[in-house]
């Protein structure tokens, strides 16, 4: 594992890559440096055949406190009052969030502490999320005159409209149990069981064909933006191409023959 870095990378022998936010002093804020590190790590993992699943975790009492507001405030020093700087940072952050969604490898958030504003957005952007039962989530921008508009994009695609609006309009903290009820996370577990619970899911997913997982993840996010007829047409085409793949032929054959499949990830 790398030391003295704001993002730690640890690749397990079973293909599970653990990315750990490690800027504890700044509560793992999504500073420009953190966004650069995280975006690069996700992109690298997406093209690395040795990586099968990504776990996104954090050190310290906060999973992620969102944007670095001191850094953002310093950006106001520009002649335009910060408009160009703010535009750049928002584009960079949006790129990282979309990079998680577009990454062919499943990404699981392992959440301890608080995940606020863009930190809550980060959790919502991951494919799965498992949290300690004392974790908390919020989109608190309204408290400081700044509506959490970009976190809203990920939040509203994972949580029903009225639940999302309640979080966005009140800025209140949401408990892990409530976050599980409304679909922001998959489940909440005891803090001392969190790592084991996340690894259990990660290992289960890592045992599947990476070709199949990439096909399914890509199709999932594409079809949910379509109308029902468009989604079925699209998904039918995906199924046809998937059926023609070597791993589908092997998997079906193994099922019929009552043996374990031998994946080639192709």
Image: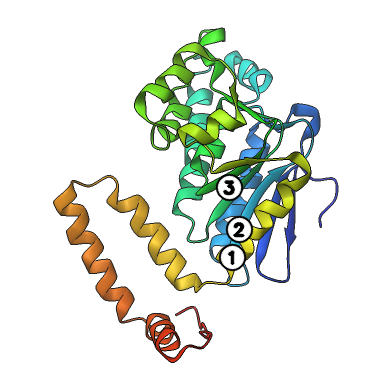
| Residue at point 61%, 14% (across, down) | 77
Q: Residue 19 location, x and y as percent?
A: 69, 51
Closest to the camera, between mark 1 and mark 3, is 1
Q: Residue at x 47, y 37 (%)?
A: 183
Above-or-below relation of 195 to 200:
above
Q: Residue furthest front?
A: 258
Q: Mark 2, mark 3: which one is toward the viewer?
A: 2
Drawn side of residue 226 relative to residue 114, left or right: left
Which residue position holds label 3?
39
Q: Residue furthest right?
A: 3
The answer to whether the residue labelled 1 contacts the one labelled 2, judged by CB atoms less than 8 Å apart, is: yes
Q: Is residue 94 above or below residue 13?
A: above
Q: Which numbered circle lies on residue 72?
A: none
Q: Secondary structure at mark 1?
A: helix
Of helix, strand and loop, which one carries label 3? helix
Left of 215 or right of it: where is 260? right
Counting from the top left corner in percent of width and height, residue 191 is at 75, 40
What is the CA distance from the residue labelled 1 to the residue labelled 3? Answer: 25 Å
Q: Answer with mark 1 or mark 3, whichever residue precedes in sequence.
A: 3
- Neighbour tally class for label 2: few under 14, some 14-19, many 20 plus, Cα within 10 Å: some
């Amino acid at each position: 594992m790398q030391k003295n870095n704001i993002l730690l990378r640890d690749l397990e022998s079973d293909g599970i890559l653990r990315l750990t936010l490690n800027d504890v002093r700044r509560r793992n804020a999504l500073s420009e440096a953190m966004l650069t590190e995280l975006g690069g790590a996700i992109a690298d993992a997406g093209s690395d055949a040795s990586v099968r699943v990504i776990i996104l975790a954090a050190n310290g009492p906060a999973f992620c406190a969102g944007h670095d507001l001191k850094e953002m405030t310093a950006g106001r020093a520009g002649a335009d009052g910060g408009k160009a700087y703010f535009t750049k940072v928002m584009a960079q952050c949006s790129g990282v969030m979309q990079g998680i969604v577009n990454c062919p490898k499943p990404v699981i958030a392992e959440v301890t502490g608080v995940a606020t504003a863009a930190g809550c957005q980060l959790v919502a952007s991951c494919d799965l999320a498992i949290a300690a039962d004392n974790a908390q989530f919020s989109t608190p921008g309204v408290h400081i005159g700044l509506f959490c508009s970009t976190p809203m994009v990920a939040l509203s695609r994972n949580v029903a409209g009225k639940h999302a609006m309640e979080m966005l309009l009140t800025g209140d903290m949401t408990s892990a149990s409530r976050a599980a009820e409304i679909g922001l996370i998959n489940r909440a577990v005891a803090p001392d069981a969190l790592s084991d619970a996340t690894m259990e899911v990660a290992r289960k997913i890592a045992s599947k064909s990476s070709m199949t997982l990439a096909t399914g993840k890509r199709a999932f996010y594409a079809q949910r933006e379509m109308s029902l007829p468009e989604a079925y047409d699209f998904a039918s085409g995906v199924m046809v191409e998937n059926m023609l793949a070597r791993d589908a032929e092997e998997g079906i054959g193994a099922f019929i023959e009552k043996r374990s499949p031998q994946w080639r990830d192709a």
